[in-house]
Image: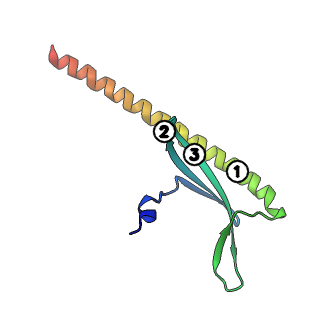
C-alpha cells in the first residue's frame, strides 16, 4: 500500500444532482474541524469510460446552485451532530465525576 493510499480519507458525505456531485470532506485544523466541499461533474467519454471534471457547462449552473444549497444544509447537520456529541460527552464526564465524588464520601 502506498503512502498516498494510507493517508486517503473517506468523505463525510456525497450528494448528487444528476451528473453533478458534491463531496464533503472533514479537515481537522488548529482551530478545530472544518469542512470543504468539492464539486464535480461526471461524464462518459467516447469509449464509455467515466470521468469527473471540475468544469461546469452553462446548463449545469442552476443544478449546481441547488446542489450547493443541499451541501450547505448537510454541512450544518454534520456540525450540529458534532456539537451535540461533544455536549453529551461533557455531560457523561460530569455524571462520572459526581458518581466518583459520591464514592469517596
Q: Residue furthest right?
A: 58
Q: How many marks?
A: 3
Q: Quadrant of residue 48?
A: bottom right
Q: Quadrant of the C terminus?
A: top left
Q: Where does the image place residue 90, in percent across and percent down from the top left?
A: 38, 28
Q: Residue furthest front?
A: 3
Left/right placement of residue 103 relative to residue 25 reads: left
Q: What residue lies at 55% left-to-right and 54% top-to-bottom?
A: 13
Residue 82's label in the rendered image is 2
Q: Disc 1 versus disc 3: distance between alpha carbons?
A: 13 Å
Of tags 2 and 3, which is closer to the observer? 3
Q: Where does the image place residue 11, in percent across and percent down from the top left?
A: 52, 56
Left/right placement of residue 99 relative to residue 22 reads: left
Q: Is residue 97 above or below residue 28?
A: above
Q: What residue lies at 47% left-to-right and 34% top-to-bottom?
A: 84
Q: What residue lies at 67% left-to-right and 49% top-to-bottom?
A: 70
Q: Disc 1 versus disc 2: distance between alpha carbons?
A: 21 Å
Label 1: how many Cα within 10 Å (few below 14, some 14–19, many 20+): some
Residue matched to label 3:
35
Residue matched to label 1:
68
Q: Disc 2 versus disc 3: distance between alpha carbons?
A: 12 Å
Which badge, 1 or 3, comes first in the chain's sequence?
A: 3
Name the element at disc 3. Answer: strand
Amino acid at each position: 500500500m502506498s503512502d498516498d493510499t494510507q493517508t486517503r480519507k473517506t468523505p463525510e458525505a456525497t450528494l448528487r444532482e444528476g451528473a453533478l456531485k458534491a463531496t464533503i470532506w472533514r479537515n481537522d485544523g488548529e482551530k478545530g474541524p472544518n469542512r470543504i466541499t468539492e464539486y464535480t461533474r461526471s461524464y462518459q467519454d467516447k469509449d464509455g469510460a467515466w470521468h469527473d471534471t471540475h468544469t461546469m457547462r452553462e446548463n449545469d449552473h442552476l443544478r449546481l446552485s441547488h446542489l450547493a444549497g443541499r451541501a450547505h444544509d448537510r454541512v450544518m447537520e454534520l456540525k450540529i451532530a458534532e456539537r451535540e456529541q461533544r455536549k453529551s460527552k461533557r455531560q457523561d464526564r460530569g455524571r462520572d465525576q459526581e458518581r466518583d465524588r459520591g464514592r469517596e464520601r
